Image: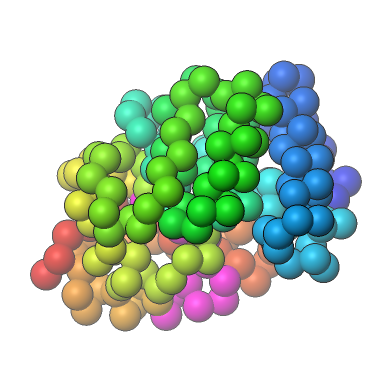
């Protein structure tokens, strides 16, 4: 997906206010990248395709579930902050253990005028919020992710986990230790990337 295609996709799926917030998020990431290494420098010129729309494609998979969207290891704001910018009525919790990143996220939330977003500076293992949606992008493998965040999941929780080429292999390995419904969606933004969608996850 090119930058032009990514922007067109976003414009077709979200209203003008959402697009303005996403454009503001783009600027915030670019500005902050001069102070700390938020994303790979090679991806700054492709923020919409590599990061913003790559995050927004999770929203249709989440459906209209009520409750907290909890994003693990939010970092530069993807996917959790992009989700909140596009869908500000959602209650979003951004979990980020690194202080500089957490400070950046709090400042970005304020600048974007998001009222339903909380930033938690902590490791996910110490978070006890129960979530309707759990997301994590480029954090760790599925087995470790489920082990560290299972206390945040309920029976109806859906996990939305962007992955690269290894998605099917990670699901196969996770099934050895975890029950649940798992399937793999093709990413819209990269033919070599996928999204693991899981529900009913519990230890064997």
Quarter-wise, where is residue 149 in the image? Answer: bottom left
The quarter of the rendered structure image containing the C terminus is: bottom left
Does the magenta run of residues contain 163? yes
| In the depicted structure, whether residue 131 falls above or below residue 100 | above
Q: Position of residue 130 (x, y in %)?
A: 25, 40
Q: Position of residue 94 (x, y in %)?
A: 46, 43
The residue sitting at 32% across, 71% down in the picture is 144
Does the magenta run of residues contain 43? no
Is residue 14 in view? Answer: no
| In the depicted structure, whether residue 20 falls above or below residue 158 | above
Task: Please state if 157 lies on the left or on the right of 54 as rendered.
Answer: left
The quarter of the rendered structure image containing the N terminus is: bottom right
* Residue situated in front as seen by the camera: 52 or 92: 92
* Residue situated in front as seen by the camera: 177 or 93: 93
The residue sitting at 23% across, 45% down in the picture is 128
| In the depicted structure, whether residue 191 falls above or below residue 130 | below
* Residue situated in front as seen by the camera: 137 or 41: 41
Task: Please state if 165 lies on the left or on the right of 202 as rendered.
Answer: right
The residue sitting at 71% across, 59% down in the picture is 36
Residue sitting farthest toward the left? 204
Total marks shown come to: 0
Task: Please state if 199 lies on the left or on the right of 16 as rendered.
Answer: left
State the extent of the magenta-drawn residues as a range. 159-169
Q: Position of residue 117 (x, y in %)?
A: 48, 30
Is residue 59 in view? Answer: yes
Quarter-wise, where is residue 105 in the image? Answer: top right
The residue sitting at 81% across, 40% down in the picture is 27
Quarter-wise, where is residue 18 in the image? Answer: top right
């Amino acid at each position: 997906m090119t930058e032009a295609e990514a922007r067109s996709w976003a414009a077709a799926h979200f209203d003008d206010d959402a697009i303005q917030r996403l454009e503001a998020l783009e600027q915030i990431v670019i500005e902050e990248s001069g102070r700390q290494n938020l994303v790979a420098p090679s991806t700054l010129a492709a923020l919409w395709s590599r990061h913003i729309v790559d995050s927004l494609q999770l929203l249709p998979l989440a459906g209209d579930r009520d409750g907290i969207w909890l994003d693990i290891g939010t970092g530069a704001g993807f996917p959790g902050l992009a989700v909140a910018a596009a869908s500000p009525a959602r209650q979003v919790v951004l979990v980020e253990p690194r202080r500089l990143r957490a400070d950046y996220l709090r400042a970005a939330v304020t600048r974007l005028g998001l009222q339903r977003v909380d930033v938690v500076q902590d490791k996910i293992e110490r978070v006890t919020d129960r979530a309707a949606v759990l997301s994590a992008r480029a954090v760790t493998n599925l087995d470790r992710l489920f082990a560290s965040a299972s206390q945040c999941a309920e029976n109806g929780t859906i996990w939305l986990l962007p992955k690269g080429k290894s998605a099917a292999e990670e699901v196969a390995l996770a099934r050895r230790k975890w029950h649940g419904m798992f399937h793999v969606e093709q990413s819209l933004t990269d033919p070599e990337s996928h999204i693991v969608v899981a529900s009913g996850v519990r230890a064997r």
